[in-house]
């Protein structure tokens, strides 16, 4: 299976800088870059001189660049066929969506098209966020919120143009839209390109990373006395080892996150976490989730869970994009583990209370 990374972000967020590095730098990786050529920041104008009929260009570092003039599935199919025939050699694919594009339909291609699903494995969606203009863009364009909501990893770019407080406020805003995605401040002139690969964002694994700051604030907001998980989560930018999670007090550089006051943005895209130590009734949960996906599927961007099911001695994991959900049995519950369920939902104006009440009603 050829791993695929979807690269998204609004106009000017730094995608072109990153792609230029991928296509020119001596990093030793053979990457096929598929560029959606309707974008305003067209990479090929600057670095490719091409014959109008030539779709695929071999770069000097072994990477391949092709600009889409049509259907993504067809282009992927062509690439796979050329690889099998020995005409092209590449190990992974990066798809750049245009700055104005919703990455959802691109991601869905890998679930809906069986031929594509047989050859390619969607690894992760990476969203670049411009530190200077992000707040304005998030306020003005719902597509930018979608790009954030779909992400498995968020890169804050151009951070040198704003102060620390602005970065912290932006991180806080992004966290509430998507607590699953690790947030990193990067400079693409220096960042390690390998950091964008093999993130396994779409793996059905028994680990559900949720930013601990989000969980702490969530507890303050709802007064839930759920115990935190014991998986020793670390967040890319902070060391959480010193956090006293039970009291919702986490002191990074003197900040008390539980009582942080940030500018309030009423973003359409929000997220919430459901946790319980009681097991689910499998039939009830299946019916309820099926109904939720049918009614709210278009508004659900990403969702994932690790579940404690009655009568099942293994963890059940599920995740999805819109209406497309996959589930699987994972590892056995270990005797030392505290059995519990944890689910995160990211979507557009989701009825949080209705969903959490419904999930509660599915517990044994």
Image: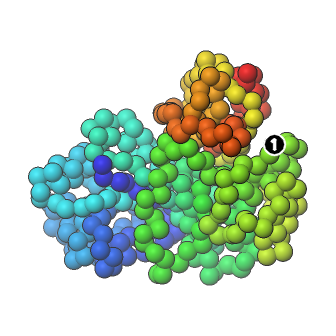
Residue 22 is situated, as x and y percent measured from the top left of the image, at 35, 72
Indicate the quadrant containing the C terminus: top left, top right, bottom left or bottom right. top right
Q: Is residue 243 something that shows in the picture?
A: yes
State how many labels appear: 1
- Residue drawn 51% across the image and 33% down it: 329
Image position of 299 with respect to 130: above or below: above
232 sits left or right of 259 in the view: left
The quadrant holding residue 361 is top right
Closer-to-camera residue (137/191): 191
Work out which residue is located at the far front of the displayed protein and give it.
335
Closer-to-camera residue (108/1): 1
203 sits left or right of 302 in the view: left
Closer-to-camera residue (277/332): 332
- Residue drawn 25% across the image and 50% down it: 75
- Residue drawn 26% across the image and 38% down it: 115
Image position of 241 with respect to 101: above or below: below
262 sits left or right of 141 in the view: right
Residue 9 is situated, as x and y percent measured from the top left of the image, at 51, 61
Q: Give the structural element (helix, strand or loop) at label 1.
A: loop
Residue 279 is situated, as x and y percent measured from the top left of the image, at 70, 28
Q: Is residue 146 something that shows in the picture?
A: no
Residue 112 is situated, as x and y percent measured from the top left of the image, at 37, 35
The quadrant holding residue 350 is top right
The crowding category of the residue bearing disc 1, from other C-alpha atoms within 10 Å (few below 14, some 14 to 19, many at least 20), is few
Residue at the spot of label 1: 226
- Residue drawn 56% across the image and 37% down it: 332
203 sits left or right of 66 in the view: right
Question: How is colour applied across the structure in the image?
Answer: rainbow
């Amino acid at each position: 299976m050829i791993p695929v990374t979807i690269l998204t972000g609004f106009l000017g967020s730094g995608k072109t800088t990153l792609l230029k590095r991928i296509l020119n730098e001596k990093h030793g990786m053979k990457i096929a870059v598929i560029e959606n050529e309707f974008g305003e920041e067209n990479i090929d104008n600057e670095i490719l001189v091409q014959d109008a009929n030539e779709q695929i260009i071999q770069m000097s570092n072994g990477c391949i660049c092709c600009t889409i003039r049509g259907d993504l599935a067809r282009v992927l199919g062509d690439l796979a066929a050329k690889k099998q025939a020995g005409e092209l050699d590449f190990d992974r694919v990066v798809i750049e969506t245009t700055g104005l594009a919703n990455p959802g339909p691109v991601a869905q291609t890998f679930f809906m098209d069986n031929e594509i699903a047989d050859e390619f494995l969607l690894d992760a969606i990476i969203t670049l966020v411009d530190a200077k203009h992000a707040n304005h863009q998030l306020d003005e364009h719902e597509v930018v919120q979608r790009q954030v909501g779909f992400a498995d990893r968020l890169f804050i770019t151009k951070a040198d143009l704003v102060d620390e407080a602005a970065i912290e406020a932006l991180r806080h805003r992004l966290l509430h839209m998507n607590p699953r995605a690790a947030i990193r401040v990067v400079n693409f002139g220096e960042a390690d390109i390998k950091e964008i690969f093999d993130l396994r964002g779409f793996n059905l694994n028994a680990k559900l990373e949720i930013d601990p700051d989000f969980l702490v604030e969530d507890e303050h907001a709802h007064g839930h006395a759920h115990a935190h998980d014991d998986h020793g989560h670390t967040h890319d930018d902070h060391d959480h080892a010193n956090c006293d999670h039970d009291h919702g007090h986490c002191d990074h550089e003197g900040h008390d996150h539980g009582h942080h006051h940030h500018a309030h943005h009423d973003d359409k895209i929000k997220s919430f976490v459901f946790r319980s130590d009681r097991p689910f009734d499998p039939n009830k949960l299946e019916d309820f989730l099926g109904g939720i996906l049918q009614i709210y599927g278009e508004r659900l961007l990403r969702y994932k869970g690790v579940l404690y099911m009655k009568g099942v001695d293994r963890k059940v994991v599920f995740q999805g994009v819109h209406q497309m959900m996959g589930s699987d049995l994972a590892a056995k519950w270990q005797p030392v583990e505290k059995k519990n369920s944890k689910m995160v939902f990211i979507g557009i104006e989701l009825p949080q209370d209705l969903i959490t009440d419904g999930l509660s009603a599915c517990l044994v």
